[in-house]
Amino acid sequence: MRASQFFIATQKEAPQEAELPSHRLMLRAGLIKRLGSGLYTWMPLGLRVLRKVETVVRDEMNKAGALELLMPAVQPAELWQETGRWDVFGPQMLKITDRHERSFCFGPTHEEVITDLARREIKSYKQLPLNFYQIQTKFRDEIRPRFGVMRAREFVMKDAYSFHTSLESLEATYASMYQAYSNVFNRLGLKFRAVRADTGAIGGDGSHEFHVLADSGEDALAYCPASDYAANVELAEALPPAAPRDAAQETLREVDTPKQTACEDVAALLGISVTRTVKAIALMVAHGEGQSRFVLALLRGDHSLNEIKLAKQPGFADFRFATEEEIRAHLNCPPGFIGPVGVSAEVSVIADHTVAAMSDFVCGANKPKFHLAGVNFGRDLPEPSLVADIRNVINGDPSPDGKGVLELCRGIEVGHIFQLRTKYAEAMNATYQAENGELKIMEMGCYGIGVSRIVGAAIEQGNDARGIIFPAAMAPFSVAIAPIGMDRSDAVKDAALALYAELQQAGIDVLLDDRGERPGVMFADLELIGIPHRVVIGDRGLKEGQVEYQARTDEQAQSVALSEIVSKLK
Ligand code: ATP
Ligand code: MG
Ligand code: MG
Ligand code: MG
């Protein structure tokens, strides 16, 4: 690409509201332009990056045997009513009405659409297993769009859905997706960690998230360096700790009738009337068919007991929540029916919206057709939006596997895989004919990658004072040729054009900066954009048959013979 015919839209300053380096740099490098809250245009330069990510994702999905299709972004309400999610999904779903007053949503995810397809098209066990995927625009009306494309409202996701005759088959595909995801993030040159992300009590190993490691990540991850245990702290906290905790540190309060509750009511219900912060885990307790109750376990952890004014609540002091058994006994609940579905959240009563998030959560969890298995926050439930830093509560705690202590780091969720089991297939009656002729419900898995979020996450990991440092696999161009005085010197012009042609021939993505900018401007742009390799061609060097080569991560340029530069760049 010749820069004079391309569109480079770099800018000196990023707007104030861009909090993270990746967001600032994406705007400054002109990869994206903001249209509105959580809405971005991918500029030609940024789109090259996005497409490179897509290419790697697509390639690994194809290699793993998944089949690409493309579903409509706009989905009829009826499908969502079948699974009960039309009401449960919450305000993240953008609902729209057509000219005939029929309801639709702009798809935040596609379980319903694909399950509808599967029940129509899959007839026999002979067709299974199948794994379909798409790379497509999703819309989620996030409560707080921020960090540019990382928490946007419109974003690009790769979502895959697999169908099976048995749990074993689902597990096999799940394992191959786990591997495919690892391959994707390795190929993209990202430092990442896969962590467990489902309820230990119910889902077993049923869900993993893939996180790009970054201090600015919204999620806290706990891992045990002495073993392979790694979990989202949401999960790590929900699991019973390996070593018995002081039961007095933890207390239970039952919320009897989950319903939409005003902030003050929730505060009253929780027995917190003061401006204090407590940690809580939401737990859902099912009592057999269709009935469930909700408890909030207030974890006192490191917080001093005096900080939480709960003592006056009748009965409160009697409940000490340390184990599932205790809750079961208290709630008269049969074994096997209890599981933490919640995340830990800092419940700060000072901030009304935090309590509101909690009340949403309580309300959402109790809707009919809600199954314990396969819960995905933000998709099945309103998102408990404030997961604050909870480092001090569990850092150094024993690992649930008993093999060491936990360490904490932060991550950006870029992928999430799930064993959904029969949650959707059952609700939508997606059956197939088994070998013995019986009609059976399909087992299902789903697998998401935040394609556009990856671009932000990669920049969060790769940047310096000069700008973006793209991993090779996603750089918009691999090599930049920066000729000095191309308009004045035929020697420079000839050498630059010849090198440009040769690199193109070699299949290398090359940008020839023929804009005629001063060297300072040119270098600053190329560094800001994060092109991994730069070749400077000037009259002085050419006289000796030399050009200057500098990798984006090098401190200094080095002279390289013009005759050797192509082989060096290959
Ligand atoms: P988060 O916890 O960050 O809100 P999620 O758990 O709601 O994500 P999933 O339903 O698991 O998201 O969707 C699959 C993937 O889509 C996520 O792992 C993430 O990479 C990406 N994703 C989700 N929400 C957004 C968003 N608002 N902007 C960009 N990417 C997103
Ligand atoms: Mg999540
Ligand atoms: Mg979400
Ligand atoms: Mg997720």
Image (cartoon, rainbow, N blue to C red):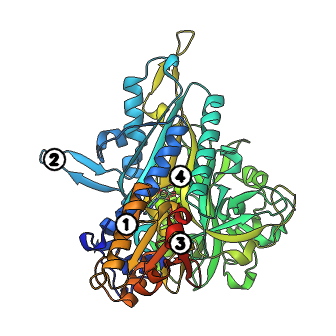
Query: What whole-number distance in Å separates the C-alpha atoms at marks 2 and 3?
Result: 36 Å
Residue 264: percent from left, percent from top: 48, 76
Q: Provide the residue designation for mark 4.
A: 376
Asked if marks 2 and 3 touch (Cβ < 8 Å), the reply is no
Q: Residues within 10 Å of mark 4 (few under 14, many from 20)?
A: some
- Tell which residue pokes out farthest to the top in this image: 436
Q: Provide the residue designation for mark 2.
A: 101
Q: Is residue 51 left or right of residue 63?
A: left
Nearest the eye: 480 or 346:
480
Query: What whole-number distance in Å separates the C-alpha atoms at marks 4 and 1?
Result: 54 Å
Asked if marks 1 and 2 touch (Cβ < 8 Å), the reply is no
Q: Is residue 392 above or below residue 413?
A: below
Q: Provide the residue designation for mark 3.
A: 386
Q: Dot 2: what SS? A: loop
Comes first in the chain, label 4 or label 1: 4
Quarter of the view holding residue 330: bottom right
The verdict on label 1 being within 8 Å of ligand 1 is no
Q: Can residue 533 be seen in the rendering of this structure?
A: yes
| Comparing labels 2 and 4, the label whose residue is closer to the camera | 4
Quarter of the view holding residue 409: bottom right
Residue 463: percent from left, percent from top: 53, 78
- Tell which residue pokes out farthest to the front in this image: 543
Q: Is residue 113 left or right of residue 549?
A: left
Q: Provide the residue designation for mark 1.
A: 498
Q: Residues within 10 Å of mark 3 (few under 14, many from 20)?
A: some
Query: What whole-number distance in Å separates the C-alpha atoms at marks 4 and 3?
Result: 16 Å
Residue 263: percent from left, percent from top: 46, 73
Nearest the eye: 273 or 172:
172
Q: Identify the residue at image location x=49%, y=51%.
A: 56
Q: Identify the residue at image location x=46%, y=72%.
A: 531
Comes first in the chain, label 3 or label 1: 3
